[in-house]
Structure formats: C-alpha cells, structure tokens
C-alpha cells in the first residue's frame, strides 16, 4: 500500500517548520525538514572548501553526505551541527546551491527515503511540486513579509544569534526572490495545494486547519 504524505511548502518564516513538527507529532508520522538537507550540504561544502559553483563536487557530496539524524540533533561527520546550520549566512549559501540542478538531483533519493510507515510530513519549497507530487494533501503556507521577518528574528534571537532586523529583512527578501525565480523547482504552490495565509493565525490554528484537511481527505 502507499505510504501517505502531507507536504508543507512556503517561504522562510511562514511557520512551516513548526507546523510540520506539530502535525507530524499529532499524527505520529515521520518528518522531513528538506531545508535542513540544503543547509547541511552548504555547511559541509564550506568545511571542505568546495566552491558554490563546483556542481560536480557538490553533487557527489550531496549523495554521500555523512549526516545522521538522532532525535533533535543533526550530526555531520559525528559533530553536532544542529545550531550551526540555522544561521542566515548558511541559509543564504543553501539557497545559492539549491538553484543548481545537480545539487537537487543529488539530494533526491535521500528525501524519498524519509517516506516510511506510518506516514510522512515533509516541509520545504518543492515538496508538493517535485518531490512528492502525488501527495493527497499539499499545503502552501504564507504570511506577510513583515510577519515572516519578525518570526525569523525571534527564532534566531531565541537560538542565541545576534541579529539586526533590517539586515535580516533584506537577507530573507533576497533568499525568497532567488527561491521563487530559479528555473528549477521554484518556490510556488502546487496547482492542487491548499493555500494558507498564517499572518494573523496562531500556530495552533494553523496546525488544526492542516489536521482537519488531513482528516477530511481520509
Ligand atoms: O527551509 P529553509 O529556510 O531551511 O531552507 C533553506 C534554503 O534551502 C531555502 O532558502 C531554499 O533555497 C533551499 N530549499 C530548497 N528546497 C527545499 C527546501 C529548501 O531549495 N525543498
């Protein structure tokens, strides 16, 4: 039988990461944070001195990424990088290499491997359009640019980073623009996606909305 998938795509700060974790928890399903894979690859490339334009080496690294997911922690070559990958600098690097077809190709199998019983909740930019196009429930989560910048700011500050709000607004804007305008797997809602604007919603409201959509689709 087919293993069910819920995809949650959207721009940075839309709340998809938190929503995905809570929906997966509520259903007892597995979780794929696909953005983390692009961030891990960016960090690994930086650590091994691979240039952002070196497609061949990035592809090889993507397919062989020595990464381990252990509950809350992410280990790269045995070192805990769960916090290091969350900086906006790594986010920007991730979005640059994410525009390369060979990088996306190199990470494809790894993403499909997360689809295990009893089900998967996957978040990213192209979960509904490219990676799991047959998913019965696809959500596209948005929020106003101001609200998304505010959420990312609080998130980064919470994790102990020094952030300048004006710089952050500009970095997020540039990253979203790059993600939306790239020719391959651009950030956009799937044709059959449920589009949810979370600007004035609480995270509980977002999660309940997604869960009720999931229930109504069986
Ligand atoms: O979601 P997150 O902010 O962690 O993603 C970091 C970057 O990775 C995004 O800006 C995007 O360029 C890239 N990404 C992607 N496709 C995905 C998930 C993330 O291109 N499915």
Image (cartoon, rainbow, N blue to C red):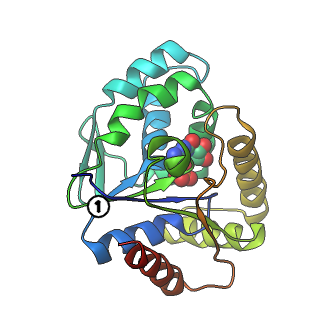
Residue 166 in the figure: left or right of residue 17: right
Q: Residue at x 64, y 34 (%)?
A: 96
Graded by Cα atoms within 10 Å as few (under 14), some (14 to 19) or many (20 or more), the crowding at tag 1 reads few
Label 1 lies in ligand 1 vicinity (Cβ under 8 Å): no
Q: Does residue 85 show up? A: yes
Which structural element holds mark 1? loop
Left/right of residue 4 with respect to residue 137 in the rendered view = left
| Residue 90 seen in render | no
Q: Position of residue 210 (x, y in %)?
A: 47, 75
Counting the numbered discs, the total is: 1
Answer above or below: position of 210 versus 140.
below
Q: Quadrant of the C terminus?
A: bottom left
Which residue is found at the position 75% from the left and 40% from the top?
181
Between 114 and 157, the residue placed more toward the observer is 114
Q: Is residue 91 above or below residue 96?
A: below
Find residue 54 and report its horizontal and vertical position in percent: 56, 16
Q: Position of residue 19 (x, y in %)?
A: 47, 72
Front position in the image: 80 or 191: 191
Q: Give percent across and percent down for residue 147.
A: 71, 74
Q: Please indicate whether residue 156 sits to the left or right of residue 1 in the image.
A: right
Which quadrant of the figure has residue 191? bottom right
Q: With respect to residue 123, does 24 lie above or below? A: below
Residue located at (27% from left, 34% from top): 77
Quarter-wise, where is residue 186 in the image?
Answer: top right
Residue under label 1, please give it. Answer: 72
Residue at 71 percent across and 50 percent down: it is 176
């Amino acid at each position: 039988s087919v293993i069910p998938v819920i995809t949650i795509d959207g721009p940075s700060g839309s709340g998809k990461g938190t929503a995905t974790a809570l929906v997966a928890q509520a259903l007892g399903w597995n979780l794929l944070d696909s953005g983390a894979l692009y961030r891990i690859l960016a960090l690994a490339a930086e650590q091994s001195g691979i240039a952002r334009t070196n497609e061949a080496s990035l592809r090889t690294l993507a397919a062989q990424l020595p990464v381990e997911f252990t509950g809350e922690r992410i280990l790269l070559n045995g070192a805990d990088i769960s916090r290091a990958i969350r900086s906006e600098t790594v986010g920007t690097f991730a979005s640059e290499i994410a525009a390369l077809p060979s990088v996306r190709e190199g990470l494809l199998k790894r993403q499909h491997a997360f689809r295990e019983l009893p089900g998967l909740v996957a978040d990213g930019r192209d979960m509904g359009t490219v990676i799991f196009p047959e998913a019965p429930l696809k959500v596209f989560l948005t929020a106003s640019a101001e609200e998304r910048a505010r959420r990312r700011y609080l998130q980064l500050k919470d994790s102990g980073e020094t952030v300048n709000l004006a710089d952050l607004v500009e970095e997020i804007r540039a990253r979203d623009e790059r993600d939306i305008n790239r020719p391959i797997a651009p950030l956009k809602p799937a044709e059959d996606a449920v589009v949810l604007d979370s600007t004035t919603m609480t995270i509980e409201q977002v999660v309940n909305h997604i869960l009720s959509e999931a229930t109504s689709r069986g």
